[in-house]
Amino acid sequence: MSKIGFTTSRSPAKKTRSFIHDLVSIVPQSSRVARGSATLLYTISAMKTKKFETAVIIHSVKGNPNFIRIYDLAEEPEELPFAIKVRGLTLSREYVKDKERARPVFSILISSLDNSHENEILKRVFRITNMGIDKIKDKNYVTLYADYLDRDEGLIFLEFLDKNNKQAGPRMKIRIVPREVEQTTKSESK
């Protein structure tokens, strides 16, 4: 069963749908969840019923993925007190030549980020394993490389490579931002 569900705000642009397709192709045990016209509360409740552990909602601004909210579904659905702001994005279709690649079973993180909180967020959203490379080297895996572009601004560059060091997913510039969240998911937002 999938552990992470990716979905969008209502009426997503084509680029946002392609972005989710990219993420699902590289994040182990993840699935795309079609939202349609359902409310956010209904969508999150449906994910919990289907045994997802994490819900990732990608919001668009002017047709581009812009803001990512994350919900913990282990107990009662709860929005986590941070978000990911997408500051730049190149979809894999723009540069990946091998479109028929196997889906990874594991993902690992190689990070030069000095903030352990940022590393933990990346591990959660991209389902990073805690196993060492020596234990998974015979499996299909993807490596997420994370590095600061601007440490003072908190701007992070993310790149995904397969086990043969070939581009495997989107390239992203992000910022992880703290966020005040309501205690309940009953409030609906797009």
Image (cartoon, rainbow, N blue to C red):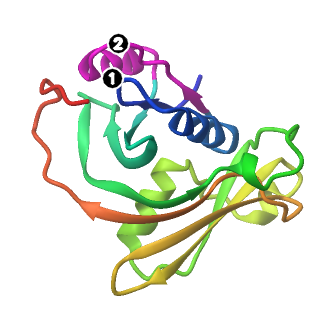
| Image coords of residue 36 (percent x, y) | 41, 14
Q: Residue at x 28, y 63 (%)?
A: 177
Q: How many marks?
A: 2
Q: Which residue is mark 2?
A: 37
| Image coords of residue 105 (percent x, y) | 74, 42
Range drawn in magenta: 30-51
| Image coords of residue 20 (percent x, y) | 56, 37
Q: Earlier in the sequence, mark 2 or mark 1?
A: 2
3D distance between C-alphas at marks 2 and 1: 13 Å
Quadrant holding the N terminus: top right
Q: Which mark is residue 116?
A: none
Residue 62 highlighted magenta (yes or no)? no
Q: Nearer the viewer, mark 2 or mark 1?
A: 2
Q: Which residue is mark 1?
A: 44
Which SS class for mark 1? helix
153 vs 14, left or right, is: left
| Image coords of residue 159 (percent x, y) | 65, 64
In which quarter of the view is residue 176 placed?
A: bottom left
Relative to 95, does residue 20 appear above or below in the rendering?
above
Front-most of 160 and 112?
A: 160
Name which residue type carries label 1.
Ile
Relative to 8, does residue 39 appear above or below in the rendering?
above
How many residues crowd around disc 2 within 10 Å: few (fewer than 14), some, or many (20 or more)? few
Q: Residue at x 43, y 84 (%)?
A: 150
Front-most of 86 and 124?
A: 86
Residue 31 highlighted magenta (yes or no)? yes
